[in-house]
């Protein structure tokens, strides 16, 4: 029997991206609760990104930091009558296996995927980027760390919003589920943390001291700690599958006396 059996696990990621995580949790006997707190939307003005796509041959690299970024970029490619062949001759990097898979599904094999799925890790593995023009199609609220590090190494990054992240209010039924109590709250990005904390304040909801806070990676965990949440676990592999694996291991340790459970990172 899975250690997640009957555990009520809140999933805060966007509705259109939550299906795999919800299904995986349900398959392990958990009771997943869909509680989307953000939504992904097109940018209001795609003109800057369209201009960059029209002159792609001026770039030596394109770095994708999320599957959302890949999808949004391809939508603008299609609007310009192009497809993945427009990236021929340009080095493409992807942060993480999910982003890589999104590119593969569109016929593009990234030449570099870092071992650690965070923005800073990608620069070290790219080699000499001095003087090279690098396109970063990203979320409108993306962190500046990647562009800053590229500039330090002499690169010429062009950072453009390819999609927007919007806070959304969960449906009344979802709020009722939260009020009833959950065993775990999962976060897959800093934006999910910020929106969730805002919802707690607006709805005057307090989490139980026993509720486990689980984060997909260290950046998300840092945001959670900064906003006053006690982080109980951080996935070693910064993917949804890695998050589920970390949850299974966490509750297995709780079920076996004498096995240490990692202390809070908050």
Image: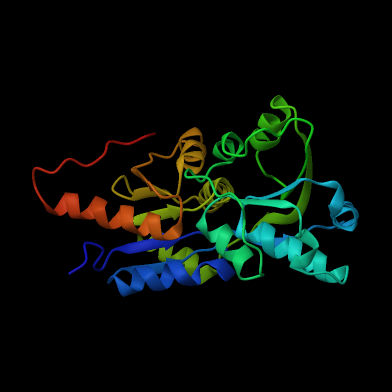
Q: Taking the image as drawn, is residue 37 in sight?
A: no
Residue drawn at x 39%, y 55% is: 243
Answer left or right for 186 relative to 246: right
Task: Indicate the colouring scheme.
Answer: rainbow
Give the percent coordinates (x, y) of residue 116.
Answer: 48, 43
Q: Taking the image as drawn, is residue 174 in sight?
A: yes
Q: Give the residue at the far front of this rendering.
A: 89
Q: In the depicted view, which residue is nearer to us: 232 or 153?
A: 153
Residue drawn at x 62%, y 61% is: 109
Answer left or right for 211 relative to 67: left
Quadrant housing residue 86: bottom right
Q: Quadrant of the N terminus?
A: bottom left
Answer left or right for 199 relative to 85: left
- Numbered-mark total: 0
Give the percent coordinates (x, y) of residue 261.
Answer: 22, 42
Q: Give the residue at the far left of this rendering.
A: 257
Q: In the depicted view, which residue is nearer to us: 193 or 253?
A: 253
Quadrant housing residue 106: bottom right
Quadrant housing residue 69: bottom right
Q: Quadrant of the C terminus?
A: top left
Give the percent coordinates (x, y) of residue 195.
Answer: 58, 50
Residue drawn at x 55%, y 67% is: 17
């Amino acid at each position: 029997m899975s250690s997640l059996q009957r555990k009520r696990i809140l999933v805060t990621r966007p509705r259109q991206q939550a299906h795999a995580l919800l299904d995986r949790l349900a398959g392990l006997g958990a009771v997943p609760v869909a509680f989307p707190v953000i939504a992904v939307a097109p940018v209001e003005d795609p003109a800057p990104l369209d201009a960059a796509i029209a002159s792609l041959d001026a770039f030596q690299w394109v770095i994708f930091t999320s599957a959302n970024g890949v999808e949004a970029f391809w939508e603008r490619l299609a609007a310009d009558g192009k497809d993945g062949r427009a990236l021929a001759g340009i080095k493409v990097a992807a942060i993480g296996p999910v982003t890589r898979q999104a590119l593969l599904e569109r016929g593009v094999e990234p030449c570099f995927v870092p071992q650690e799925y965070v923005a800073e890790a990608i620069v070290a593995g790219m080699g000499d980027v001095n003087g090279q023009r690098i396109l970063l199609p990203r979320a409108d609220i993306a962190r500046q760390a990647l562009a800053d590090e590229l500039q330090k190494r002499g690169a010429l990054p062009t950072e453009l919003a390819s999609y927007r992240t919007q806070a959304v209010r969960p449906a009344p039924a979802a709020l009722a589920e939260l009020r009833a109590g959950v065993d775990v709250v999962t976060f897959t990005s800093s934006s999910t943390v910020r929106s969730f904390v805002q919802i707690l304040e607006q709805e005057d909801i307090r989490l139980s001291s026993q509720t486990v806070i689980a984060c997909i990676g260290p950046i998300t965990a840092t945001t959670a700690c900064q906003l006053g949440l006690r982080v109980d676990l951080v996935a070693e592999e910064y993917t949804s599958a890695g998050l589920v694996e970390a949850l299974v291991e966490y509750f297995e340790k709780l079920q076996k006396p004498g096995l240490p459970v990692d202390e809070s990172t908050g």
